[in-house]
Each structure stands twice: as structure tokens, then as C-alpha cells.
């Protein structure tokens, strides 16, 4: 028999009160778990949907009057990207998933105490998810936290005879078909203040940072999920979205992504190349409406006991693009 | 400037009481963090050391009268493997690192309450680490937990001029040189009971399981670090070590490992192949004294909200070796 | 504009007499060019066709009453595999392409002078090709030589706007979809005599050989196309087909092939592994009727001025399967 | 026993008259075999040698008063690169190896008849090789042809116990260590005339071409060795060297090359990327004195019966750099 739902009691259930009352050392982890979904606005929702399905290989899980919801093939949750029609391209919000329903109240308290108003949305106000909270970050972004997200299942089919190839990380490759969303990079006028907020109020850990000559943070890389970054912040206008990034499994997938993008007439922004920061291999490119996407792989596994790595501005070229050793204007200045 | 130690206050410090008193949702995580080190006995310590350095590419961090301590190049901690001279090959203990010093007391209490005596070792009793606790598991293995481990730094050199290649995940490849230890697999007469202990008392989460026709667990895969497994248990004699495994970054590294092993006259046990369970790519082989090693890559990222996958015995071949679809006697019966 | 047919006069045309009369040093090469097609018999032509299209990813180029003709996506010629219905599985013939129509007469003369009768088939007697000659080899195989083969074009589409992904070596990967057929391995009672025939009469060059303790050839690897082998001969019954092999571009494609085979329930014979001889990476497996297939990549580029490599029987394990270091009975004894 | 020299009579020997008198269809091939060596001038021979050994991983096979001779690890011949001290960086000559000593006289006749004077050098006049001929091409380059080159053996060691890792295509990877030289690209004022010379007089075959709006050749790709190109010509000043290129085995080696170059402070010119023409994956970069190097892999296997592919100028971006879809000034204008 193929992998299937587990017998009763062996699956973590966020509503299972026995688990919730376990001690902190052996109970399930608490707080922010990972990036859940990115909500962006697009000026042509059909074109955007055609791209995110036909080139990127995401699946549409729901459509409403003004929005399309999509997920990657190896994601269980309802969606990791929402496209909403609007008259300009931009970012609606970033939604992070928390481990447990109770974490919402705790984090609401922390954000409120920090002085930022928090809005609470009930189940049903947002498609595919239960109660959530929303607030503005010091960087001027709307952030959502949610614990209860509808599971729509992965594309790993569950027939009785054999494990399916998609169980094994492979999908038909006329689309890029990344297994999942990985991280996002936002812009902020005051990187240091914003970073402090994400660390102190929301519990992110800093894995790497880029400092200017005066020791001020020009960019910070923050994680909650044992990855090099779930969220990064670089200097720029408040509320800006530099890019969101999909995970790929290896360097050959990066080459395949470049082949598929080029075949579809999409010019690359930067890459294939490697970052000094995070060590990851990468390509940047723009969706047809102008939102920057990234495909990303590699990097190291930064457990919480790993030291933060610090880079200085005189080495910014290698820090960002290790092979080129220099930045380009488009990468530095263009964002949505 | 190359990556360097972070400015004060931006590095997680397990002894930092301000961090320790943070709320559970935003403070650093608690409990078991990952596999720390495997301690095995060898009948020829020079031969074993020659193999683990010259073929596997680990670095010796310390030697004592009867033992050699080794680490992988991208590991910060003092060692991930201890070889101790003894008259037979076997396993001394498995040591898991916990997030915080305070976790030791909490976990000591839980294990004691479960009815198992716990021994406390003070700083200095074990090389390279502070206070630790030790106890026997229901599977008859000695388990150690420790929070405070001496950091000896990675091989990522820190010269001022440029990021180093080892920063970028590449090392000279006449050795396999995996970046880090990944997981271990132990044998137990009662897989179900042992699994329950690791879940309930120590807080492991089950990612996949293999059931016999009566629904009993034949094997379980358990994690604490957002990986497909930090520890796995399969049916066998109590106290046995089936293998410990090193992480590799991608499938090409698996081929390179096979080339290096074959060049050194080491016959492979199984592989290169893929597991159905964990989806990982793998090779098994034996060190010159007979302890089974694995190199492992791939798999998926099983966040704590991912469902447990269940496999049944009629599909055991594909579950273990997805390409061959069948097990071999040596793999099933031979362990140390 | 995408790649297209060349202007007049810039494409090699075997019937172009100006080219044919060029001097031997600057004219097009002469003699055998490469393996053209393998003709095998199958006991269930629908099942065989389903496998060679649905799993292997070849394209059907023609069907007749008793046969199906197939080619790989990057091959220009009419077919590289013919499946013919018969009551037992076996090999009808191996067809090699020669550079020029005139080569047929020259080679016919050489084979006849060697004492072997040669049959001449006119255009139309065999589907998709012009005049050809046929004869038996000392190893008891029917060999065909042909210069004029209908070109049906590759799957590289030729639309005006952009190079196509298949131009770039990538195809949809729910099938293995190798770009082309690479080589075949036949069995012979007298490897030495057969090898002599292929070298002296047909002009093959020996790249590697495996000798027994008395210096007799147990296996020979022969080429005409700057590859490690177009044809290999190992000890066995006369007239036998050990396997034919498809080219893959790299090691990651070998892993993908294993994934696709396993997903389709096809158990691997041997591999993924590496050969000592040819250095190539490989998987062996059987089509559903029992003919052994191989996927092969790597190896070196053995220009005609490279020395022949000789292996001896005491090292036969490493010579054949470099990682395992030993042969298995099935690989040695089973062929069609 | 490891691969060794073959028994008498089974190795192709260019001086073996029996072989030389074989018929053209079954004898060894004739004419130009492949690119043999590139001779360039450098303004700092120690720096250049440090780079070509320490970064590129070539081996020095000989030194004379003004020159250093180097080869790649899997090359048998005396050298594939000669560095000669001079007051400016440039190209001395390109040397192609021919199959047989007799080919020299035939080709000398053809070049002379074309109206170009041919110089004959006796054995000993050039290090590591026998008699050769030299002449200027219409593109203003000095071309050398030679049959008899001293074989110094590959780095494949020949100890009795086991095949060596370098037999298997792997070398220590703190240098790029390509197995061999692959091709070169020269510049010419009249690409069409030069191409005609290389085809008609020297027997090259055109695999791909790039045409301007009037159908004139802007670039041509030419082969003699079943590879996508041994020599390419693009529009530019006569006598110029755009780059010479090393072969790598696969895309992961391209990434490793980029890592090694970046670590050594060498900024990439273009890439990692893919060519539309040849389909190959590539990086361009400059040696410390300013000669452009390339590492190249992939492409297809263009047998002599494959049609020439034609690209037009409106698609030049994708033809040259398939991912970027555009050329950069440096690539177009800078050469030595």
C-alpha cells in the first residue's frame, strides 16, 4: 500500500489538547512555523494565472471573483500564493503559519504591547483558513498569522499499488514545478528597526547580516524553520516586495528552470548564479506583470545554535552574487 | 570582509537568561535539537581513524588514550563521531543536543517519571561538552542529552579577502567530505514501545512508519529538526546500531561518494539507490571494522504540520529500496 | 528565426558526387558511421510498444502488419528500433549506418572476400531506407549496412519565434526520453575471432578489452564514432543479444530514469552504478518481454589515437561494475 | 590488473603501414582529427602558469626558456596549451592533429594549390612533436598540422590493484581540472571566405551558422571530431582569438568551476548559462593576462549526417546566450 493517512493518534493535530498541554521541551514547537502564503496584486489575472500554472507549474486550488489561489505540488496547505486583481502591481500581505491556535493570542499580545494595532479575522473571512490576526510591521508591510489552514493534500497520489513518482520529488518537467514556496525578501527604510521587530516581537532568528561601514544593517536574513531564511529584509522603500522564492531540490533543477523560462520567452534578471549569503544557488526573473520571482536551492542547514554570519559592505558584490562579484542596478532598484 | 562572528547580542547564546525567559512562542525553541554525536567502539582505532579521515574526510578534533573525536567540515560542535577502542565493534551511545541547559532538568524529570534511571555527568567528564544526562531507552540503547557543547568552528576559514570555497559547500573531493552528520538507525525488539518512548517522553515526531499486516510498527522514522528523520527504529535486537548517516548536498555527490569508496576498495552494501520512505537518495557501505555507514541526500522538508506517511509490509521492498523493490538479507540481518 | 534547414550546398548529401570525389583527407569520412537500428522480436507487440513509448519515451514513426518502428527524439533517421511480432523474443538483426552509398560496395567486397555471403536488398524492401547489404557475422548475428535512410526530422520543432526546449536537450520527463540510441552488446562463442572480423573486415577500432588468464579476449569494446563503444562483444552463445543501450546526457538523468522505471513497476537489473570499462554510468533493466535495455552516460572521448585499455579477469568485478566490484549471475547468464 | 597498454598489434599505430594501406572504408580515418594545442603569448609567464595550474588544474609537461607547456589530466598528448612570454598578449598559432603522417603531404598540397605558402617543420623544431606543416589561413591565423605527437600518458595511474579515480573522470576538485581541451573560437573579417577555406581545403564540416539579414555568415561552427565544434569563426579583426574552451563532463562541473573561479577572485565574463547554438552549457572568464577562457559541456552529438542548423541575426541573443537572450558589449568586442 502506498503512503496513507496515519492511524488515529499518530498524527499531530493542532486542536489536540493533550498535545497542546505537553511541556515545552517535548511538546510540539510553538510560534511561527514558516512562510505560509504571499498575496500579491496583478493587473491581468488571466496572464498571471497562465504564467504561474503554465510556466511555474503551480496548481490552482480556488478562484473567487477577484482572486486566484495557487499551491506547489508538494505543499499540503490550501495555497502559498494569492493573485488578486488590482490596478497596480504590488503586495497585499505576507502570511506566516504558526504552530498552534493558541500562538495567535500570545503573538497578538506581543504585537499589541509593542504598540501596533492587531486585527483579528474570523474563520471564513479568508479563503481556506480559520482565524487569523493581521498587523502592520515597522517596515510598512501587512503581516498575517494563522494556525488553522485547510489541507488540500499534495499531488502525491495515494493509489494502492505503488509509490507515485511525485512522492519521489519528480514531476513532469515542462513546467518548473517547484515542490514548495521557500522565502520572501521585503524592503524597509530602516532595516535595523524592522529586524529588531521580527526578532524580539515575533521570535525570528538572524542567520546572516550585511553591515555598512558604520555597522548599520543593510540587509538581514531571518529564519524560523531551520532554513537559511524564511524572510529577508533589505534597504529600500517601506512596504516593498523585492521577490518571493520557490525551493528547488538541486543545481540541475536550476538549469532546467532556466531552460523552461528561456523557452517561454522570459528573460532572466540574474543567474544562474550563487549567493555568498546563504550559499544558495539561484535565478531571479520577473513574472509577466513585473513581480520578481526567484528559484533557490542549496544553502546550509542553520540550526538555531549556529552563529550569525556577518558580511560588510565592501564585500557586498560577493555577498549577493558570488560569481559576478558585483550587483546590477536593476537588482538593486527595481521592486514592486 | 568574510563572514565573521556577529556583534554582541545578535548570536543565540544558550546561557543568555534574557533569551531563556522569552515566551514560548517567540523564544528560542526548546527540547531536543538534533543528533549530536554517535559513539562507537572499534577494534582497530588507527584503521578506523584512517578511514574516517582519509576516505570519509572528517577532521580529528581530539585524541585521548582510547578515543578519537571527529567532526564534519561544516559542523561547529566539538565532534559528531567518537571512536573508542574496544575488543568488539558496537555502539557506546547516541548523543542528542538539546536547545537549552534548562531542557536537561525537564527531560531528566520526564525520563525518571517514566521509570528509567538517569545519570548526570558534570562538565569535564566528557570531552568537549558541559553537563549532560544519560539513560537507557526501552530499546536498550544508552542515550545522552547535552546542551553545552564546545564550538570548534567550521572549516569555513575567515580570512579578510574573500568568502572561502568551503563557505560555499565545496571541499576538495578526494574524500567524501560530507558537510555534517544527519541521522542514525537503531534496532529494537519492540519498535512500537520504543517509538512511544521517543515520542511521549522525548518529544520526537513520527514522519513515516512501516506497519506489518496486524498494524504493528516494523519501523518508524522520527524527527526533531525539520528533516525526514533524526532517528529511525527498525525491528531487530535491542541495543543494535544499523547505521549512522552523513548528509550530502545532492545526487551528484552520491555518485562522487561511490567513486571514492570504490577507489578505496570499499564495496558498497546497497546503492546508489533511492528510499521510498523519506524519498532520499542513498548508499550503504561498511567502515573497515564493520559499522554500517550511509550517505544520504534529498528527501522532503517535513514541517511539523505535515501528516505522517504510513507504509504496509506488502510494499516493504519499494518502501526501503525504491529502485530494487526488494530487500537483501545482508541489509536486513547485519548490524553492529 | 529558429534553426532551420541550411541553404543549398551546405548540407552533406551522400549522393553529392562532388563531395564523394574529394580527397580522403578532406572529404567526408567513409565506412561505418554508427549503430543505426536494432531489430528485435517480441511476443506481444502492443505491450512492447506501450513500454517503448510510454516508459522509454520513443516515438512511433511507422507501423506495418507485424512491426512497429520507433526513434528517439533527437534522432533524425527513420527509426533506431524495430519491434517485430514473433513467437519468441530475440534479435533479428543489427543495422549500422555507413557514410556513403559507395561504402556498401566496398564493404560487400570485403565481407565476401572474407568468405561470408552477402545479400543485397533494394530500396523499398525495408521500410524507411534505401539499398542495403546483409550478412552473417562470425558471432552468428545478422548485420545490415545501409547509407540511405529516410530522415524524418527530430522533435526539435522549427517555429519562427524561439528555439524550442527540445533543441536544448530537455523533454517532458514522465518518460525517460533519451535523445538517441547509443550502442549494443552481443554475445559470441569466440570473442577473439568475432572481434578480429569487426576490426579487419569492417574497420572497427578496439577501445577496451577484458582478457582471461591466458590472454584470450572475454569481452571487447569497439567503436567507429568517437565514442567508447558502438558495439561490444562478450563471451556467450552465438547470435545472442545481451542488451542495447540508450544515451543519457548526465548522471541526474540516470537517477530520473531509475525513478521513472520504478514508478512503472520495472525492477532494475543492475544500477545505478558505474562501469570500470568505458567509465560510463549505467542502469540495466528488462523490457516487459525480456529484452535487456540499458541507459548509459559519461565515459570519455576516445579519439582514434587513444590507446586501447586492457583489463584482466582477476579484476572483472571492478571492470564491469565499478561500485559493486562483483558480477551477478543474472547479468552474466541471462540474454535474449 | 588496471588498464594497461594493449598487446602488440591491437593499438592503432600511425606509422603502421599495413593500417595505412587499408581501404578508405575500413582503415583508420584520415585528415584532421581534432584541436591539438593552442599557443598563446602572455606578458607574465609565472602568473599565467600559476593560473593554468593552480586554478585551471592543468599539468606542466615541459618548460623552455620562454615557454611553458601544459596538458589536461585526461589528455595523452604532450600538451594542449603553450604559454610563450612576449610583450603583448595574443595568439601564436592553433595546432590541429591529423590522423596520419601521410595526411600532412596531402593537406600541404591542398593548401598550396589554394595559393597559400606552406612551411614544413622537422622533428625537433617544436617541442613534443614530429614533423609538422604551418600556413596562414584567410582569417590571418597561423595554423599548424601535425600527426606525430609525443604521448606522455594521462594522469590515469596504472598501479596493479585497482582502477584509479582519475580513470573514472574524477580529480581532486580544488582546481577546475577539465579532462581536455575542446575547441577554440577565432575572429575573421570575412567569416564566409574563412569558412569556405576550412571546409573545402581542410575538410571541416559546418554544424551551425548564424546569418545576417542578407544571408551572409556572421559566425560558423565547424567540426572534424563528431562534436558540435572543434573550431568556430565569428566576425571580428583578422588574427584574433576570442577564446579557447575546455570540456567539462556535466552541469554540476560548471557550477563547481564557477565556485573555484569566484574563490580565486576571478570575475566571470558571462555565465553560467547556455548557448542556443551547440546547446552547450558554459562559463566565460579571463585568465589573469586577459585571454578569454571557456568551460563547456553538453551540446548534442552531431554525426556527419546531421543537417546544419541555421540561425538568423534577429535571434542572435538567444543563439549565443539562450537564457539572457541578449549579448553584452564585452563579449562582442573584447578579444586578444
Image (spheres, coloured by chain):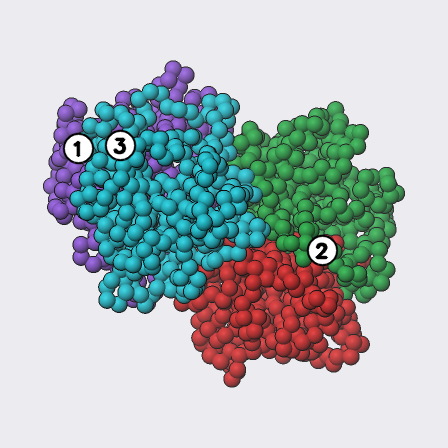
Chain colours: A red, B green, C purple, D cyan
- Count neighbours of disc 1 (C-alpha within 10 A) and say few if under 14, some if 14 to 19, many if 20 or more: many
Separation of residues labelled 3 and 1 (CA atoms): 25 Å
Task: Determine which residue is flagged by label 3.
Answer: D101
Image x and y of residue A32, in percent: 70, 65
Separation of residues labelled 2 and 3 (CA atoms): 61 Å
- Count neighbours of disc 2 (C-alpha within 10 A) and say few if under 14, some if 14 to 19, many if 20 or more: some
Chain under label 1?
C
- Count neighbours of disc 3 (C-alpha within 10 A) and say few if under 14, some if 14 to 19, many if 20 or more: many
Q: Nearer the viewer, mark 2 or mark 3?
A: 3
Camera-nearest residue between D71 and A288:
D71
Q: Nearer the viewer, mark 1 or mark 2?
A: 2
Marks 1 and 2 on same chain? no
Image quadrant where one finds the N terminus of chain C:
bottom left
Q: Quadrant of residue A121?
A: bottom right
Image quadrant where one finds the C terminus of chain C:
top left
Secondary structure found at label 1: helix
Q: Nearer the viewer, mark 3 or mark 1?
A: 3
- Residue placed at 26% from the left, 25% from the top? D16
Separation of residues labelled 1 and 2 (CA atoms): 71 Å
Image x and y of residue C44, in percent: 30, 42
Task: Determine which residue is flagged by label 2.
Answer: B4
Task: Determine which residue is flagged by label 1.
Answer: C107
Image x and y of residue B294, in percent: 61, 39
- Residue placed at 40% from the left, 19% from the top? C212
Q: Is residue D106 above or below residue C69?
A: above
Amino acid at each position: 500500500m502506498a503512503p496513507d493517512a496515519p492511524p488515529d493518534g499518530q498524527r499531530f493535530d493542532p486542536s489536540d489538547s493533550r498535545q497542546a498541554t505537553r511541556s515545552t521541551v517535548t511538546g510540539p514547537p510553538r510560534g511561527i512555523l514558516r512562510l505560509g502564503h504571499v498575496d500579491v496584486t496583478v493587473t491581468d489575472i488571466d496572464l498571471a494565472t497562465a504564467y504561474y500554472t503554465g510556466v511555474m507549474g503551480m496548481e490552482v486550488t480556488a478562484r473567487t471573483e477577484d482572486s486566484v489561489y495557487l499551491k506547489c505540488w508538494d505543499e499540503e496547505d490550501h495555497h502559498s500564493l494569492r493573485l488578486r486583481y488590482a490596478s497596480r502591481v504590488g503586495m497585499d500581505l505576507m502570511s506566516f503559519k504558526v504552530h498552534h491556535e493558541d500562538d495567535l493570542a500570545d503573538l497578538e499580545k506581543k504585537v499589541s504591547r509593542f504598540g501596533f494595532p492587531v486585527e483579528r479575522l474570523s474563520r471564513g473571512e479568508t479563503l481556506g483558513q480559520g482565524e487569523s490576526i493581521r498587523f502592520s510591521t515597522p517596515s510598512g508591510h501587512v503581516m498575517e498569522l494563522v494556525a488553522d489552514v485547510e489541507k488540500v493534500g499534495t499531488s502525491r497520489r495515494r493509489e494502492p499499488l505503488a509509490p507515485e513518482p511525485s512522492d519521489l520529488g519528480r514531476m513532469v518537467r515542462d513546467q518548473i514545478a517547484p515542490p514548495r514556496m521557500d522565502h520572501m525578501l521585503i524592503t524597509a527604510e530602516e532595516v535595523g528597526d524592522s529586524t529588531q521587530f521580527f526578532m524580539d516581537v515575533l521570535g525570528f532568528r538572524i542567520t546572516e547580516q550585511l553591515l555598512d561601514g558604520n555597522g548599520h544593517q543593510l540587509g538581514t536574513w531571518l529564519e524560523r524553520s531551520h532554513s537559511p531564511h524564511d524572510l529577508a529584509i533589505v534597504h529600500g522603500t517601506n512596504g516593498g516586495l523585492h521577490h518571493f522564492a520557490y525551493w528547488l531540490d538541486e543545481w540541475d533543477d536550476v538549469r532546467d528552470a532556466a531552460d523552461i523560462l528561456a523557452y517561454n520567452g522570459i528573460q532572466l534578471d540574474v543567474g544562474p548564479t550563487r549567493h555568498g549569503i546563504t550559499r544558495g544557488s539561484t535565478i531571479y526573473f520577473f513574472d509577466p506583470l513585473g513581480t520578481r520571482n526567484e528559484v533557490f536551492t542549496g544553502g546550509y542547514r542553520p540550526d538555531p545554535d549556529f552563529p550569525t554570519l556577518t558580511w560588510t559592505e565592501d564585500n557586498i558584490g560577493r555577498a549577493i552574487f558570488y560569481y559576478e562579484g558585483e550587483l546590477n542596478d536593476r537588482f538593486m532598484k527595481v521592486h514592486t
